[in-house]
Image (cartoon, rainbow, N blue to C red):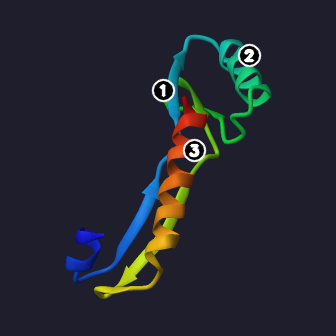
Amino acid sequence: MTALEKATGDTVLKFEPFVLHVLCQELQDAQLLHSVAINSGFRNSGITVGRRGKIMMAVRSTHCLEVPLSRMGKLMVSEEYIEFLIHTANRKMEENM
């Protein structure tokens, strides 16, 4: 709260979800890992094949959070709401574990 009170610009509370990148030798390996990730709840997972044939499997969680808190130094939400957001972000961090 002290930092927010001193802010002169825009502030945002942002929580980034878990991301794991795995370099795969074969497309079949990436497809198997992708299937496991999706079935485990990592809905934003995907496979990327680069120009040189590099196969990258990304395991991504959907547990993101991005909420504006202030605009041009003016707090736009209550302290109670900020506490709620922090609790929510911490719960998402536990889910990532």
Q: Which mark is residue 52?
A: 1
**Element type at mark 1:** loop
Image location of residue 64, percent across then percent down: 56, 52
Residue that extends furthest to the front in the rendered view of this protein: 80
Q: Is residue 81 above or below residue 43?
A: below
- Look at mark 3 in the image and give the residue it sits on: 92
Viewer-side residue, 15 vs 29: 15
Classify residue 8 by image quadrant: bottom left
Circle count: 3
The residue located at (29%, 74%) in the rendering is: 4
Q: Quadrant of the C terminus?
A: top right
The residue located at (30%, 88%) in the rendering is: 72
Badge 3 density bin: few <14, some 14–19, many ≥20, Cα 10 Å: many
Badge 1 density bin: few <14, some 14–19, many ≥20, Cα 10 Å: few
Viewer-side residue, 35 vs 18: 18
Tell me, yes or no, whether the two marked residues, 1 and 2, touch with CB atoms within 8 Å. Answer: no
Image location of residue 86, percent across then percent down: 47, 56
Q: Which mark is residue 32?
A: 2
Query: In the picture provided, is 75 more to the left or to the right than 28?
Result: left
Classify residue 53 by image quadrant: top right
> Which of disc 2 and disc 1 is earlier in sequence?
2
